[in-house]
Image: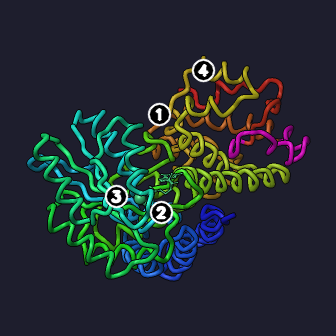
Amino acid sequence: MFESLTTRLGNVFDRLKRRGALSESDVAEALREIRVALLEADVALPVVRDFVEKVREKAVGQEVVRSVTPGQMVVKIVHDHLVEMLGTAASEVNLEAAAPVVVLMVGLQGSGKTTSTGKIALRLKTREKKRVLMASLDVARPAAQRQLAVLGEQAQVPTLPIVPGEPPLAIARRALQTARLEGYDVLMLDTAGRLHIDDALMAEVAAVRDATKPTETLLVVDAMTGQDAVNVGKSFAEQVGITGIVMTRVDGDARGGAALSMRAVTGQPIKLIGTGEKLDAIEPFHPERIAGRILGMGDVVSLVERASETIEKEEAERLAAKVQKGEFDLDDLLSQLRQLKKMGGVSGLMGLLPGIAKAKKQMAEANIDEKALGKQEAIILSMTRIERRKPDIIKASRKQRIAAGSGCSVQDVNRLLKQYDQMRSMMKQVSKLGAKGMMRGGMPGMGLGPGMVPKGFDPSRFGRR
Ligand SMILES: Nc1nc2c(ncn2[C@@H]2O[C@H](COP(=O)(O)OP(=O)(O)O)[C@@H](O)[C@H]2O)c(=O)[nH]1
Ligand SMILES: [Mg+2]
């Protein structure tokens, strides 16, 4: 349904990668994609504008310029800012007050107030061992009070007996009185909703608030709420005053943009999320999960990983082309060594080479370590450009200079050159199989695919100390 942000940003970042540094216009381009993604996730427009502006401020400038891969940096900034905006710490229902603690549930009709009232009551009963009383103030719909009573029976949480014809404010007062007299810890008040914000509704809820002095006033919102979120959030926050948000139907298709809108507009934390119709389908809010959902990707990590895979693939393709032309030089070996190091040394590498069990074993036995890779890297770095391109010119005096420059012995230099020779002849054999074969199922960047290790090639020499 949605084109994933991953794909979109991927395109932007492909261009960034080629240019290297991140300019203001690069950021602008990435932010355009992020803006669309947020809108598609149903984040309200003013919130999107504000969000994008904040990210721009963070992204343009040193933070990004200094990073190794600008694209990854932008994603991280977006993700982190999103998590920050959504609220980092999961805060649950506040019960820090003299009993009975009043929890007032407000929101539009059908948002899930009654259901959430039952869910929270059950949660407080089972987890916090609280004695909870529930009361429905919804006299607008005939069956509304009965609905809460049924939930109460299911959850085994008492509900205030229904008195037909009693107005909401009177019910609220009676509920509070009952809770006091009967020693309840918590009183949950479920209110009537309207299809849209209207003044009568707000006045009614405000009167209940004044009469009961709730510790928590939870705004219940449907995760599907789109642009309306700003209006709903603002109205309830300004006219009633809320202390937290319960977001329902997170189990549905909604991308969860309402969470960001509500949070931004009301300044209040999302405390709980509803994940189904059943009474136990309620969970604490985790900003990371919603952030991932809003951004349209499982997690940012996967995007970052994919970005780096692309780089490796391109590198492998470049290498394949060079090998075919017989141009594999020491610069290429250097880039191979760096790949090895980047992959977390040999142990990380092992998992990536399913096809060459034998080589794997040899490598393991050879006790290759990252230090050795670093040493080889140092040797190549001590060579001149010409030496790297045409290693055949490296004779005794050059070897001495290189050894001194890299802090190694001449033997080390010899060993590296020998390895290079071996690799080069191996590459020649490989290239006969065609560049495509090299890529297939092989390890990108290494040029080694399953079954591609030529006879006589001993990988244990590669990187041995
Ligand atoms: N799938 C799902 N349905 C929910 C959730 N919360 C409430 N509902 C359903 O939404 C409908 C309206 O809920 P209700 O509590 O009566 O809303 P109210 O008008 O605000 O009191 C009911 O059919 C509920 O079962 C939720 O988290 N997930
Ligand atoms: Mg209701």
Q: CA distance from mark 4 to mark 3?
A: 50 Å
Q: Position of residue 41 (x, y in %)?
A: 55, 67
- Of residues 437 and 281, the one nearer the viewer is 281
- Which range of residues does the magenta coloring cover? 428-446
216 in the magenta segment: no
Residue 371 disc label:
1
Which numbered dot is residue 270?
3
In this view, the mark in front (4 or 3): 3
Q: CA distance from mark 3 to mark 2?
A: 19 Å
Labels 2 & 4 near each other (Cβ < 8 A): no
Say which residue label 4 marks: 364
Question: Quadrant location of residue 269?
Answer: bottom left
Q: Give the percent coordinates (x, y) of residue 121.
A: 31, 43
Return the residue nearer the eye: 221 or 341.
221
What is the spatial separation of the Cα atoms under label 1 and label 3, in whole angstroms?
49 Å
* Rendered residue at 80%/49% (across/down): 323
Q: Residue furthest left?
A: 98
- For disc 4, the neighbor class at 10 Å (few under 14, some 14 to 19, many from 20) is some
Could you say which disc has been placed on residue 110 in the image? 2
Compared to 452, does 268 lie above or below? below
* Res 449 quadrant in image: top right
Foreground pick, 112 / 67? 112
Is disc 2's CB within 8 Å of ligand 1?
A: yes
